[in-house]
Image (cartoon, rainbow, N blue to C red):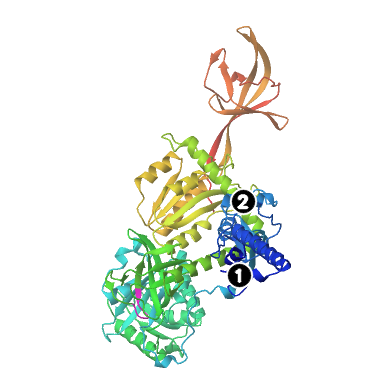
Amino acid sequence: MRSKRSDRYADENEEEDLSAKTPVQKGKRSKERSIEDELEAIEEQFYGLDNGRKKKKSKKPAPKIVEQPPQHRLEIPEFISVQNMAQALNVRLETFMQKLEEEGFEGARYDHLLDSGTASMFAELYGFDPVLATAEAQRDLVARPPAEDPSVLPPRPPIVTIMGHVDHGKTTILDYLRKANVVASEHGGITQHIGAFSVTMPGTQRTITFLDTPGHAAFLDMRRRGANVTDIVVLVVAADDSVKPQTEEAIKHALDANVQVIVAINKVDKEDANVDRVKQDLSRFDITVEDYGGDYQAIALSGKTGQGMAQLEEAIITLADVSDYRAEIDGPAEGWIIESKVTSAGRVATVLVRRGTLRPGDFIVAGNTWARVRTLRNDQGDVVSEAPPGTPVQIDGWRGEDPTAGLEVLQANDEQHAKQVVDLRLEKSEALRDATDMAAINAARSEAAEARAKVLAWQSEQGFASRKQARVRLRDSRTGWLAADESGPAKVHFVVKADVAGSVEALVAAISSIGNKEIQANIIHSGTGQISESDIRMLAATGEVGYAVSFNQPVDGTMYRLAEAAGLEVLDHNVIYKMTDVVTEKVAAELPPLVTTKVLGEAEIGQIFDVTIKKVKHKIAGCKITNGTISRSHKVRVIRGGDVVYTGSLNSLKNVKKDVTEMRKGSECGIAFDEWEEMQEGDKVQCFEEISEKRKLY
């Protein structure tokens, strides 16, 4: 017996001689072993821990644990969705939603948001130690601080932005410099979006990066963005047109951005050119040229003939040398997105490098999107091996959201780092939005889910079948799945799609401003790319009049047929002001028409007769035409004591028992009204027509 007991405990304590223990010691050791076994069972049950020990069979059930102390730390953000919380707790989503219901969170959905306090409570219920995640613990990607001594850095090409009023010749000047007919490729001869390209100047053989901003008023935001990324602004003013409203805007953006300005007085080859008037007009906007004792250079030139172009090149190079623009060529790359568009190869963004050198294989982040640089292409479409500071390149392969013009581009360490930064920014932006009113967000998401269910039901019932679905006209009814504010103006719904992000922004701004106190254009969705089936379904779900706007890109024929089946219309144009004109017409068409009445004739009832026709008595009014003509084909109204007592049509018009179509002034006739016999002697009858006129918005 002693030998067996000694072998039993030899593995745990070889130095202890169990055979020498007293009965009291044996009982104490047995009790300790029992406690250890219970703790092991608890750990295995709740944590799956084995610790290499052999499990022991026990006939007794495991003790019931009332409260489990927290063991694992869990970082809790300020706001977290139900789905993400379930994943963090390693619990099935259905199980966690049942737990929410048990705790009183009725009607919770997977995309509902929980604040940090509620999330911490559930973390404790599941045995975690909740820790509120701080902003310091989550590092965002930010630009490097500026160099302490920029003078030791290598020089970079100056970034020059061409600004001015529409049709003052901005693109023509650049066309002359790079010997490419850019204007011919822009619809309507007006630059639709910013073009970024590098030009080797013919005189000095120096490289300059130019940004060609649109002059059209709708592209105000794009031009402002161009001024914020530039070093020098060339302000183009036509010598025959002088300063115009968009010239004033360009001056304001350039001065606000605190950049150098060179005035280019274009079209001096025209007969009505007046250079002195341009200089005088510019002085009224704080642009005083050197000839008038100011600090701004003014170059008289002609982009068409090339006159003065050498002087413009010299002025730009001189100003760049004085300003001494330099940047690091090593370290993480930084820059801006100048423009983005959707092509057959996917989403493509034009990136202007600010610092560092961008190479294929690098990972970059811009806002809430990221990309791995597969190829770098210059403005001519040629593949380049690297992009040093001041170089514009086209980059494809963006992941996540669409790259938006004006976003800052920063290089990440690797793919995981880029994804983490984007996730962090999305979390921050969502938390910022949700902090305003989390309950409203949850309610809106529930309503959106119900709306999606209605869309599916509508599709199931209608199926976009061959027959055209009747749309609800706004002037007749305002009912639909998109709840309308009855106290406000009626709405005409639009989905806006364009080839590039800058055009989308301009169209959204232009279309949103169309309307008056009675009716407004309402944009329910916008983005880059072609019109898709989901866009048509989204418009159809409103139950009201809607239009799909496609700008500067082809439209699939299937989308036309799908829109026609849903009772919608696709508007396709490639010039923005033509598109806004069409949208204005469509919105104005939904205004109730202006209806006026024109009196054609008058009669007076002199006597009432009872006539029996097929054993049914009818009342006939004996009338005398006092003015104009009474016609059976027009509407009539009966006036008694200055009040209209009947408005309708004539059932019969007779002259001596003979049916007639009309009776003129001075004649007598018998009149029977349609479903009305309450006329009296002395009533006046007016025959009139309604004239409906289309209304305009403005």
Quarter of the image containing the C terminus? Answer: bottom right
The verdict on residue 233 being magenta is no
Q: Which mark is residue 97?
A: 2
The one nearer the camera, 558 or 512, is: 558
Magenta span main SS? loop
Quarter of the image containing the N terminus? Answer: bottom right
Considering only vertical position in the picture, is 571 above or below 663? below
Q: Circle 2: is it few (<14), some (14-19), or many (20+) Cα within 10 Å?
A: many
Considering only vertical position in the picture, is 108 above or below 298? above
Considering only vertical position in the picture, is 338 above or below 542? below
Q: Is residue 630 visible?
A: yes
Give percent across and percent down for residue 199: 30, 78
Q: Amino acid at mark 2?
A: Met
The one nearer the camera, 176 or 400, is: 400
Which SS class for mark 1?
loop
The one nearer the camera, 376 or 467, is: 376
Q: Circle 1: is it few (<14), some (14-19), or many (20+) Cα within 10 Å?
A: some
Considering only vertical position in the picture, is 430 above or below 620? below
Can you identify the residue that label 1 sits on?
133
Residue positioned 61% across, 19% down in the render? 671
Which SS class for mark 2?
helix
Give percent across and percent down for residue 44: 59, 59
As drawn, the residue found furthest toward the top would be: 615
Per the rendered image, the range of residues in magenta is: 387-392
Q: Which mark is residue 461?
A: none
Q: Is residue 543 visible?
A: no
Identify the image quadrant of residue 43: bottom right
The one nearer the camera, 452 or 542, is: 452
Give percent across and percent down for residue 642: 71, 33
Q: Amino acid at mark 1?
A: Ala
Compute the Cα span from label 2 to label 1.
Answer: 23 Å
Q: Earlier in the sequence, mark 2 or mark 1?
A: 2
